Amino acid sequence: MREALPIIDAAIRRLVSLDGHIVVKGNNDALFDEIEEWMNNVIVNDIQKGLQAFHQSFTNEAFEQGFVLGEWVVNEERTDITSLRTGDSKFIRFQRTPTGVNIFQRSDTDVSFRQLRREQLIYFSIDNENQNPYGWPLFRSCEFVAKILATMQNSLANVWERFGDPSFSIIYKTSKKDGMDLEARRQTLQNDLNTAVRAKREGKSADFVRAIDTASDIKLDIIGANGQILEFETPSRHILEQIIAKSGLPPWMLGMHWSSTQALAGVEVEVLMADIATRQAAKMPSFYNLIRQLLLLRGRTWKKGDWWLEWAQVNLRDIVKQAQARFMNAQADMYYLQNAAAAGITLTREDLSIGKKSPDQLTVHSEKIALPHHHHSEKEVHRPTAWPALDKIEDAYHDRLKADWSDLRKKVLAILELPHRSTKQDDDVFSYTAEQRAAIMKAMKDLIGVYDIDDPDSPIRKYYGQAYSLGLLQAASLIGQDRPVLDIVKNSEVYDKLCKTGFTFVKNDATKAIVYKILPEMEGQALAGANPRHVATRLESLFDNANSDWERLARTEMTSAAEGAKLDEWGAEGTKRVEFVPASDACDECLALAGDYEIGSCPIPGTGTHTRCRCSTRPAET
């Protein structure tokens, strides 16, 4: 059927691609890298590489045959999975026994069967009914209609072979005066006609003229000129509709642009996405177990949240927006470069490509399968020793960042004429111009300018100075010394470096939020013809999401500045060894860092650990 009818082959291939591909995520970087490296390089079917190649052949076989068996192969030491194979379902046999189902595969060279180890198999079936392990092919109910369509196409080919290149019939009616040499006359006419036809095919003009008796007659006809060709389009569409319906794909995905279906495109996509999610959920446990077996063979251990698998695929709901976004790419390049330059930001080509990915985020999403996990703990609350003065500075810095960000949000809403969205009608369409984009970039540049460290009133210098000063004072106190208040910033070079780093973080966070998230989102909403009310709600949500970045920045940087100042002070006073002290609710990473260090190698909480760290340092006991 796939060979005879291209639409069936195209439907299976399209469904395979729509089922997406598996990606690994996780909080354990080493484990994540190891799994990803294996997924990208594992040998598949002897010559291919990568888990996605296996998934494609695996899914293709299931759609075609009704079920599929994949096998993972280990090395001789049984310490690694070296390759993956997709079995030919036509050579697989199942045998039910009192203890379960045995699975056999026929050899390629003879009729013998070998029993497969179920522990090393990955099984998936389509429309598995009751206890039938063979499943049913996707197009199992289309044999009859497929045969009809193939017959119609074959007959159409025969008709066009007959009528598209017709034969000529020449009847020469003679009289008694023509004599008896009729065969010579016939041969002469045939030669003349063939010469004229060949000349026509070569683009030349050719005629043949013969003088005949007045009582003679020549009649030239085209064989089949009066034949009727059966109507093809309507009956073939009736057959195609049944095949497409069985595939579950919208007709326009297979090139059938039937106008009556376009209004149903949105509903069709929703149904298709539900089918895809169902198949993904059915396959995920097998792939999860495959990675689990890989790690067990390699002797790896892990905890929840170290790794998990997700499905990444095209979001069909926004496929039209994706096509429109491609049309805007050239303009987007120009806007990013011009507006970033206007804001005093230098973007490389690599940065530009990152920025351009943001509009496409409307068309790509990951469906996370429900495999329990927990993210890396970055929510430590309690310091080993309470430090309310530093907590106060963190809160003040966070409040300032959040307040300025809120002011920027109000300016952006005003630029986009969204403050009075309650007056907008439901049928209004959001518009977005180059002038508005430039105005938003100007507002962002003004925000960044407030924090410029060249300004003596910069909040950066104020809050980093206070945090660094607190660190110096506490360091002196912990070694039994007093520090003059006027000599707080003793190491101006270190302090300046802290301020420069802090300004870079503020600048980068604002740029990422505006250039790579908010501006592309506005473009996407305009392309989609969204209502201003929806745009305003979405814009406020994006600004609110960035508040967690400001909280992380304030909490991490103030702690790092204070803890770094302590190490600077102790180093200047000759302290040789210091102790890293985890918080009372520290994460596993920080608990593992507990202990004494040479002062130059001690991890700095926040900088040398993780964001929002609440751990601390103190002089080591001698």
Image: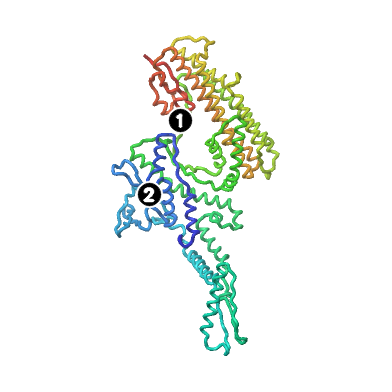
Q: Amino acid at mark 1?
A: Ser
Badge 2 amino acid:
Ile
Determine which residue is flagged by label 2: 47
For the point 43% across and 28% down, the residue is 587
How many C-alpha atoms fall within 10 Å of the one at disc 1: few (<14), some, or many (≥20)? some
Residue 161 is situated, as x and y percent measured from the top left of the image, at 52, 70
Res. 112 image quadrant: bottom left
Q: Secondary structure at mark 2?
A: loop
Mark 1 to mark 2: distance in Å? 42 Å
Residue 77 horizontal/vertical position (percent) = 29, 42
* Placement of the N terminus among the 4 image quadrants: bottom left
Q: Is residue 452 left or right of residue 120?
A: right
Above or below 256: residue 531: above
The nearer-to-camera label among 1 and 2 is 2
Q: Residue at x 64, y 37 (%)?
A: 536
Q: What scheme was used to colour the molecule?
A: rainbow
Decide which of 471, 280 is in the foreground and name it.
471
Name the residue located 63 percent from the left edge and 39 percent from the top edge: 535
Ranked by sequence position, the earlier of labels 1 and 2 is 2
Q: Residue furthest right?
A: 423
Considering depth in this image, is 362 or 303 the residue closer to the camera?
A: 362
Q: For the C terminus, which image quadrant?
A: top left
Q: Position of residue 238 (x, y in %)?
A: 55, 63
Q: From the viewer's perspective, is residue 48 above or below residue 356?
A: below
Quarter of the rendering containing residue 201: bottom right
Decide which of 600, 585 is in the foreground and name it.
Answer: 600
Label 1: element kind: loop
The residue beneath circle 1 is 377
Instruction: Spot the residue most to the bottom.
Output: 176
Q: Which mark is residue 48?
A: none
